[in-house]
Image (spheres, rainbow, N blue to C red):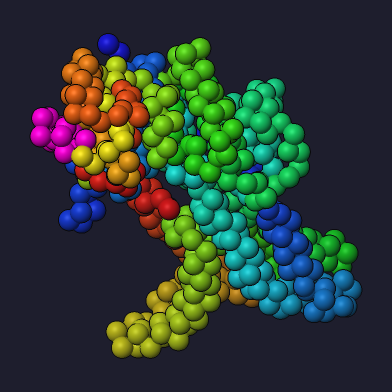
Amino acid sequence: MCKLIRAEIYRLLHSGGYMRVMLLTALVMAMLPLLTDFSLLDKTLAETMETFLMCSNMFIIYLPIVIVFFVTAGYMKKTAYYEVMAGNKIGHIIGSKVLVDGIGIGIVCFVLAIGLEVVVVVKNGTGAVTGLPARVLLFLVICLHVTLMTVLVGMAIKHFAAAAVLFLRLQFLDMMSAFLVPVLAEKCNLSTEITERILRCTLTQQIMDVFRADISVELVIITVVSFVVEVAFWYGIVYWTMKKRMYR
Amino acid sequence: MEYIIRTENLTKQYGKQIVADRVNLEVQKGHIYGLIGPNGAGKTTVMRMLAGLTECTGGEIELFGERKNLDAHRNRFSFMIEAPYLDGGMTAEENMTYAGYVRGVTDKKRRKELLTFVGLGDVGKKPVDKFSLGMRQRLGIAMALLSAPEVMILDEPINGLDPEGIVEIRELLRKLCEEQGITILISSHILSELASLCTDFVIINKGRIIENLSAEELRDKCRQYIAIQTDNTERTAELLKSMWGDSAQMSASGEEIRLYVWTEDALSVSKTITENDFVITKFVTVAEELEQYYLAKVGGSHV
């Protein structure tokens, strides 16, 4: 699989300026809090949490669109097709893209996203924010959740239309859940606690919780489990389509 | 005999449509096979099944004598099916580097040699998006050669090449087969090229292999005829038809008579014509070529 990882990194760095666009988008998104609030660098982390929350929401919605375009562009250019013909195993092909385009880009985005927050903490301290390491780790899980899901959605759909599917997933599914889950919970006589747990499975709510709520074991479990379940779901679809030789 | 590829009743079906129907293909080591058939005959589907790009609905594939773990054996193959994989945003060198990583070949010298070999040594930083179709085909072939494959499966590799390029690629493939013992399975619509390159031919139509023959067998089977022109070709044709029946046919252009008889009969044919006071202006023995043979086999005019 090492050779495929090297190939994917090479493609990422040389293919049509995607890397430049990705980094530029990430950088703009990372600097967005500063553009929103010029006095940000003079405040404590606690005072800037709402600004960072708002910008993080945009960060994890718009950056994946660039990533999904890169992944599907590869499919349109028949990369997977070529890698299969070269005798590589399906698991290795998926693995290399997941590692490079998902985890690799996810970590880069995470570092860029929290860069400004680190500056704020170093300069002015955390203020009243508690459980900072846990919040940072959960934010990393959310970043990986978004980038891995993005890569796998792109690999499952293998077309630029994946961007639309991803946008619907990130925007409408979460938004609809916020309205529909309480209604359904009421009809099914579910308790408020269960309803809240279900809502906490959505990415939008998880980001809000990382910035606003107290860090609890339940929050950690729900964030990690929803990440694992969704990634496993999309991985299964990608593996199945490749096993069935559904290439473009 | 050592077979690199063997298929047994290989079948591909999309819904009710059978694209490949019980294909039994045997490819011997060191031979160049020409896969010939009209559009939609199933050539590319068979190649895609061999490359692992599409599942077969029925039958089995054997690569290097094994029916299991085919992916591992595909590493010894090089495929160029439909358009070659190329990233338009990258240069030829970058595409070669990517292909090298995928195949585990990192020899920079070999990449440069191959690019020079296919005539792309001086394209510099020009992105592949700006390449002509012929240049893309050459790059595809260079990429296919990168891992020093034992078998090459090439689908229409000379499409879009200029006449000079076609000759170069033909000579290159012949050299690869003769000097490095590479087995080649190639499909093309340019039958004259296949005829001068291949050692074996597989004719496929409507998803089925209708004939599998060597170049020697093809030469034996290609019918010979005598092309005749006289000062009155039409009346001569009537005369020859009265004596040799359907063996005497007018050419499509109506300018000459084609008499499908043994060449040993040529003397009696010319005697008959001159004895009937016709003046012979052309009398040539012609052997049919692959193209005519193929058309006679598939019963169509579209190659």
Q: Is residue A69 left or right of residue B268?
A: right
Q: Could you say where residue B272 lies in the image, as x and y percent from the top left?
A: 18, 24
Q: Which residues are magenta?
A: B236-248
From this viewpoint, is residue A225 visible? no
Q: Which residue is depicted at the point 30% across and 13% down?
A: B2
Q: Which residue is depicted at the point 38% across and 27% down?
A: B195
Vertical order, B51 against A23 (above or below): above
When asked about the image quadrant of residue B76, the answer is top left
A202 vs B97, nearest the viewer: B97
Q: Could you say where residue B209 lies in the image, as x and y percent from the top left?
A: 22, 35
Q: Which residue is depicted at the point 63% across and 35% down?
A: B96
A222 vs A105, nearest the viewer: A105
When asked about the image quadrant of residue A3, the answer is top right
Vertical order, B281 against B159 (above or below): above
Q: Could you say where residue A165 lies in the image, as x and y percent from the top left?
A: 47, 69
When asked about the image quadrant of residue A42, the answer is bottom right
Q: Could you say where residue B52 lies in the image, as x and y percent from the top left?
A: 36, 38
Vertical order, B14 against B45 (above or below): below
Which is the main secondary structure of the residues drawn in magenta?
Answer: helix
